[in-house]
Amino acid sequence: MAGVALKTIKLGGLASVIRAAVVSDSLGLSLNLASKTGGSSIGAAALVHLGYALPNVDWGINITNQSLVVDFAKRPIRQKDGGFECPAGPGLGIKVDEDVIANYRLPGCDRKSRK
């Protein structure tokens, strides 16, 4: 079985991955979707949603947020029983942990200082 591995960071975003996946499917190729090493649950959620939307993800989805010491999501994406539960809710279904974000915010880069 032949196939390709697609990375959103290498192809320039989700729309480009979708186009590549459509071409790959038309050629009978299987897909693997892979995220950036050290990507957060925000990127992982986007990749998982993409995996649910594409028809030929026979080679799986590889996310890397599990290797982070700190993730920006209140409930990080985790692999379960060889797959992923697609996050539900508005947008990507991820709730960002604002307290974690605040710990990493640089002085002078808060919302109030941008007005």
Image (cartoon, grey):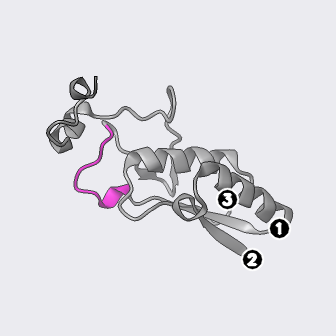
Which quadrant would residue 22 be assigned to in this image? bottom right
Identity, as a three-letter code, of the amino acid under mark 3: Val
Residue at disc 3, secondary structure: loop
Q: Is residue 7 left or right of residue 112?
A: right
Give the magenta range: 65-73
Is residue 68 rendered magenta in the image? yes
Indicate the position of residue 90 as horizontal and vertical percent values. 50, 26
Q: How many marks?
A: 3
How far apart marks 3 and 2 lie (CA) works out to 12 Å
Please state which of residues 112 and 81 is positioned toward the viewer in this rendering: 112
* Residue topped by disc 2: 2
Q: Is residue 14 left or right of residue 21?
A: left
How far apart marks 2 and 1 lie (CA) works out to 8 Å
* Residue topped by disc 1: 28
* Residue furthest right in the image: 26
* Residue topped by disc 3: 57
The residue that appears at 46% across and 50% down in the rendered structure is 44
